[in-house]
């Protein structure tokens, strides 16, 4: 009897497996999540075998139906867990990674999360003929892939007439770096490299030495910049990445260094279809598109991966780049590249998870033979300028350099032989490549005679990632994912030839939100009928208001980590880390002299101002999955991720 049951069990697995793997193989030709599909269908096959096995056992031993159902759910949950681990191993193999992913002891405790879904699927399979099971499984999963993951942009793109260029409607170019520190550029004192093309923008206009981001991390900062509003006003307070990547790391590796994970049940996490820049928020792309501008985003988006949130839904006629928060710059193992692996969980995770993925208006591109990604984005930006040289245009060139993973062309690496540390040398080679890509853009403007009718901004989405140990933000304290100056103050320069006097240095606080308002006013656009936090910078750099401060007060909040700067004083609050600080930021920009105990009245004043501002904010639209521990001067600070 036992032999017959086992024979029947394995026969079912093989039969289901052959059919489903064949269908899966066909879908492999078009589906982007290639390694998941055959495992999904094989899982259905195994589950079918488990059902047959359970039914045979139940029949022979006269078990109650509930026992058979629970047996199927339990064995199916274990199978689902096992297939996820196989998928992780394939992921590791596919990327050539040597990092931790696979059969970890702590992963088994998560098998229970598959119980309920497996129970439902199992009962459906038990009650439906096998052909219907396979057809419905294939159909539902294919639909899911089509709508959410194929990258075929389902956005409803509203057309707008592109108007010819004129002097009353200047072109606008926003060049954004990713994780670039204030002191990573020669214009701000870096002695390791020269960045002549970025420096030229400052020399042709103004270098802002106290430009603040609205959050010391990429996506939230970009949301604030593009809307001219604190992103907290509409609940965009955490990264929108749909999957908790931290769960793909071994628990002991993740917790090394004090990091913490948030555990959510599978049914209580915000779906990808709800993670992104809300449709009722108006971006600079939409403002300028309505003014007859051709609009393009070249590079990183990171404001939502679902079609509801992609660039086309937010005013961009053209997008060439990627939707998520990071990408490889070239294929792993490319012999024309240098790589640096940092042996840190964030870096490990990116090498494991990422690929070189480029999409043009949602359509996946073949990147074989393409140049290094930073150079590619520079070339595409120049092409857009060439195509629209007679038109009004808005170009948002959102580079992902020098964000990890650390990859750079050998030609730039070879130029920096004076930098002894290999990883640091690759990092600064990335910045040299970024500078050349900026040069590709600015040289195209010069070639076409468009400089006098184009506003150019260059900045970064947050401070340098000092936790990588590749750079530091000295003399600033801290870095990315902290609210100290090293995380909040970024390089920012701006030029408008003939309109902004050259060789200026502006030392008063400004915000990246000011890009929105400055550009909209210059384009004679009507501002949205809602609270706009950015200000027009032009009067401050054209002598009219040069002695005034654009912002008397600035805020930032990332769930529990908060900051307020009012006048010369700055308050930093992080209750999860049990830290609170007050600094006289004008006289102590290194943030070394904490005045919390000496000036309780000032502390209370700033706390009251912060609380009043928080009353205006919306609750976060989605949850965070982890708390990253960052060492700052020997103290641990947590940041929600």
Image (cartoon, grey):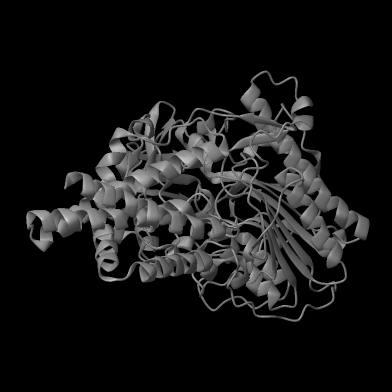
| Residue depicted at x 50% and y 63% | 145
Q: Is residue 238 left or right of residue 126?
A: right
Query: How far from the left and from the top, in percent, is residue 575?
Result: 31, 44
For residue 367, above or below residue 66: above
The correct choice, above or below, for 163 with respect to 505 in the image is: below
Left or right of 255 on screen, residue 286: right
Q: Which of 615 and 223 is in front in this view?
A: 223
* Front in this rendered view, residue 194 or 589: 194
Q: Where residue 353 sits in the image (x, y, percent)?
A: 51, 43
Residue 50 image offset from top left, x and y in percent:
26, 53
The residue lying at 22 percent from left, 55 percent from top is: 73
State left or right for residue 591 relative to residue 105.
right
Q: Compared to 127, does 96 lie above or below?
A: above
Q: Where is residue 389 in the image (x, y as percent from the top left)?
A: 87, 66
Figure quadrant of residue 15: bottom left
Q: In this view, does 426 lie to the left or right of 79?
A: right
Note whether residue 174 is visible: yes
Residue 604 seen anywhere in this rendered image of the structure: no
Q: Name the residue nearer the viewer: 214 or 508.
A: 214
Question: How many numbered marks, from 0 up?
Answer: 0
């Amino acid at each position: 009897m036992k032999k017959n049951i086992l024979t029947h069990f394995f026969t079912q697995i093989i039969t289901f497996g052959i059919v489903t793997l064949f269908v899966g193989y066909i879908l492999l030709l078009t589906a982007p999540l290639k390694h998941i599909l055959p495992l999904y269908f094989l899982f259905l096959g195994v589950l079918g075998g488990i059902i047959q096995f359970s039914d045979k056992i139940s029949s022979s031993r006269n078990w109650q139906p509930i026992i058979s159902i629970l047996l199927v759910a339990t064995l199916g949950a274990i199978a689902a867990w096992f297939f996820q681990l196989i998928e992780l191993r394939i992921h590791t193999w596919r990327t050539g990674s040597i990092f931790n992913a696979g059969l970890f002891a702590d992963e088994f405790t998560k098998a229970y999360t598959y119980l309920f879904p497996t129970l439902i699927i199992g009962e459906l399979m038990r009650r439906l003929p096998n052909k219907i099971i396979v057809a419905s499984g294939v159909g539902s999963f294919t639909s899911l892939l089509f709508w959410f993951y194929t990258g075929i942009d389902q956005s409803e793109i509203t057309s707008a007439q592109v108007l010819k260029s004129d002097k009353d409607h200047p072109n606008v170019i926003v060049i954004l770096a990713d994780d670039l520190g204030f002191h990573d550029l020669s214009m701000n004192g870096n002695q390791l490299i020269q960045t002549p093309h970025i420096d030229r923008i400052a020399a042709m206009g103004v270098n802002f030495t106290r430009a603040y981001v609205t959050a010391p991390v990429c996506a939230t900062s970009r949301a604030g910049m593009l809307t001219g509003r604190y992103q907290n006003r509409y609940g965009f307070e955490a990264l929108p990445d749909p999957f908790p990547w931290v769960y793909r790391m071994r628990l002991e590796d993740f917790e090394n260094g004090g990091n913490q994970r948030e555990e959510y049940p599978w049914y209580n996490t915000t779906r990808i279809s709800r993670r992104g820049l809300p449709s009722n928020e108006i971006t600079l792309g939409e403002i300028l598109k309505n003014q007859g501008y051709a609009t393009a985003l070249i590079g990183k988006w990171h404001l939502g991966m679902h079609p509801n949130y992609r660039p086309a839904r937010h005013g961009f006629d053209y997008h060439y780049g990627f939707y998520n928060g990071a990408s490889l710059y070239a294929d792993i193992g490319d012999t024309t590249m240098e790589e640096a692996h940092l042996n840190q969980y964030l870096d490990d995770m990116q090498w494991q998870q990422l690929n070189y993925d480029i999409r043009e208006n949602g359509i996946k591109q073949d990147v074989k033979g393409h140049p290094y990604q930073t150079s590619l984005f520079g070339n595409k930006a120049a092409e857009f300028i060439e195509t629209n040289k007679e038109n009004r245009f808005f170009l948002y060139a959102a580079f992902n350099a020098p964000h990890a993973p650390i990859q750079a062309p050998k030609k730039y690496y070879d130029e920096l032989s004076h930098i002894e540390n290999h990883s640091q040398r690759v990092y600064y080679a990335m910045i040299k490549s970024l500078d050349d890509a900026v040069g590709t853009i600015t040289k195209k403007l010069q070639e076409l005679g468009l400089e006098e009718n184009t506003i150019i901004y260059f900045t970064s989405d947050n401070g340098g990632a000092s936790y990588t140990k590749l750079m530091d933000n000295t003399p600033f304290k801290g870095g990315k994912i902290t609210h100290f100056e090293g995380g909040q103050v970024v390089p920012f320069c701006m030029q408008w030839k003939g309109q902004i006097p050259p060789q200026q240095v502006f030392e008063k606080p400004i915000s990246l939100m000011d890009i929105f308002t400055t550009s909209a006013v210059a384009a004679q656009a009507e501002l949205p009928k809602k609270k706009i936090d950015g200000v027009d910078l032009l009067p401050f750099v054209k002598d009219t208001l040069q002695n005034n401060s654009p912002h008397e007060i600035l805020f930032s909040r990332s769930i529990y980590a908060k900051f307020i700067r009012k006048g010369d004083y700055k308050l930093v609050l992080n209750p999860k880390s049990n830290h609170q600080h007050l600094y006289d930021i004008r006289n102590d920009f290194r943030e070394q002299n904490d005045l919390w105990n000496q000036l309780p009245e000032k502390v209370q004043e700033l706390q009251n101002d912060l609380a009043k501002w928080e009353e205006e904010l919306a609750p976060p639209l989605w949850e965070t999955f982890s708390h990253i521990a960052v060492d700052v001067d020997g103290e641990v600070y947590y940041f929600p991720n």
